[in-house]
């Protein structure tokens, strides 16, 4: 059998009648001079690690220093998150509160509403039957203006003569079948510097070309010009100069406007973080509003995840816009007649009922008797029957 590790290496000797005398113990051998005696536990030579001692003891001071550094980093991170999240939570709570309550009686359509129409109406795809159907759709609503896509403009500000070959046909048909409804040429383009390969409004030659394009569509018979140039950064003086130059050349000047800062100077913060200052300062919004006949707020694509928050946001935007829009300028709040789901827009949250309720709440709290006020519906080719039903029931107050 195998030996146990505890057994001796040699077997015991055989027993005899008389035990053998024990051998005398060996004489101790003195250790050589200068050689340490292992039995005395002499230390290893200086500078040579002794593996029998195990790893060195931890440096308590270094460990404390590292732990303190980690705690400071965690505190800094939590502080930054609090600075970002806390104002957002406060703002969202305020929007939810802003959606509470009941609109005042009479805060309904003033018959100054508008509808954005796609390019198909001026490029030959629509027919007389389509105009007849549109007239039936708009009967007994508050829609007075049609923004018909007649562009886009070239980056140098010019408008190709081939852009809207059926414009005169449409204008004539609308005036015949919808008396009192005005047809405006919707012109737009992307702007530099945020989009470098785009229109540069800082160039006077470009602004002059935009003015010439406005004259061109007015000569074609349009009742006015509606501009949607994006993104216009808050405080852009070149945009204001363009509006000043446009005012004398068109009988009706209208613009699509960015939203107003939901928090003070929010456009500056957002521009620093994302490079896209989506909002306008309220003061700048007022400067634009004083230069036009109509200003339509693009009160959609708000990044709000719930109907209540979106409706509260629209109520806030309505109040902010009313505060700085002159009484002789039509203020229109945009309604989302489309159903995309993407970053910044959730169709289940940005609904027509929520928007209309928000509009009525903002109007009720700020200027309930204002006559120069309406809503603008974006956009005809994406609208559903539910959108039209909500607009009629909640804003126009017709079945």
Image: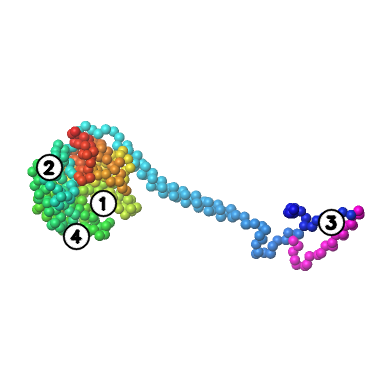
**Labels 3 and 4: the sequence-earlier one:** 3
Residue under label 3: 13
Circle nearer the viewer, 2 or 4: 2
CA distance for labels 3 and 4: 115 Å
The residue nearer to you, when weighing 235 against 81, is 81
Q: Are marks 3 and 1 in contact (CB under 8 Å)?
A: no
Question: Which label lies toward us, 1 or 2?
Answer: 2
Label 3 Cα neighbours within 10 Å, binned few <14 / some 14-19 / many ≥20: few
Relative side of 43 to 297, left or right: right
- As for residue 33 lying within the magenta part, the answer is yes
Sequence-first disc among 2 and 4:
2
What separation in Å lies between label 3 and label 1 (alpha carbons)? 107 Å
Q: Main secondary structure of the magenta part?
A: loop
Of circles 3 and 2, which is in front? 3
First of labels 3, 1 by sequence position: 3
Which residue is tagged 1? 234
Callout 4–callout 1 Cβ contact below 8 Å: no
In the picture, the disc for residue 156 is 4
- SS for dot 1: loop
| Residue 131 part of the magenta-drawn span | no
SS under mark 2: helix
Which residue is depicted at the point 36% across and 41% down?
Answer: 90
| Image depth: mark 3 or mark 4 in front | 3
Residue located 37% across and 42% down the image = 89
């Amino acid at each position: 059998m195998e030996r146990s590790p505890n057994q001796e290496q040699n077997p015991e000797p055989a027993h005899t009648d008389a035990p053998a005398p024990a051998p005398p113990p060996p004489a101790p051998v003195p250790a050589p001079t200068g050689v340490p005696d292992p039995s005395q536990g002499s230390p290893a030579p200086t500078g040579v690690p002794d593996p029998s001692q195990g790893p060195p003891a931890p440096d308590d001071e270094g460990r404390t220093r590292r732990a303190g550094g980690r705690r400071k980093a965690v505190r800094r991170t939590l502080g930054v998150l609090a600075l970002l999240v806390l104002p957002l939570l406060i703002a969202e709570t305020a929007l939810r509160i802003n959606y509470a309550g009941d609109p005042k009686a009479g805060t309904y359509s003033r018959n100054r509403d508008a509808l954005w129409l796609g390019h198909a109406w001026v490029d030959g795809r629509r027919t007389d039957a389509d105009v007849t159907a549109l007239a039936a759709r708009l009967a007994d609503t508050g829609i007075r203006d049609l923004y018909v896509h007649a562009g886009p403009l070239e980056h140098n500000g010019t408008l190709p003569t081939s852009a809207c070959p059926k414009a005169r046909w449409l204008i004539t048909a609308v005036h015949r079948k919808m008396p009192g409804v005005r047809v405006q040429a919707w012109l737009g383009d992307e702007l530099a510097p945020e989009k470098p390969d785009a229109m540069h409004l800082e160039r006077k030659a470009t602004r002059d070309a935009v003015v010439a394009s406005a004259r061109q569509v007015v000569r074609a018979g349009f009742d006015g010009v509606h501009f949607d140039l994006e993104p216009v950064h808050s405080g852009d003086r070149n945009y204001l100069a363009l509006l000043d130059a446009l005012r004398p050349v068109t009988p009706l000047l209208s613009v699509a406007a960015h939203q107003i800062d939901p928090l003070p100077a929010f456009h500056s913060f957002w521009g620093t973080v994302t490079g896209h200052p989506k909002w306008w300062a309220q003061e700048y919004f007022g400067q634009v509003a004083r230069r036009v006949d109509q200003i339509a707020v693009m009160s959609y694509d708000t990044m709000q995840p719930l109907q209540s928050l979106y409706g509260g946001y629209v109520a806030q935007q309505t109040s902010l816009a009313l505060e700085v829009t002159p009484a002789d300028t039509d203020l229109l709040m945009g309604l989302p007649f489309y159903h995309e789901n993407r970053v910044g827009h959730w169709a289940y949250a940005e609904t027509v009922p929520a928007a209309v309720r928000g509009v009525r709440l903002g109007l009720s709290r700020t200027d309930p008797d204002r006559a120069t006020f309406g809503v603008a519906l974006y956009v005809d080719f994406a609208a559903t029957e539910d959108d039209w039903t909500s607009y009629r029931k909640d804003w126009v107050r017709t079945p």
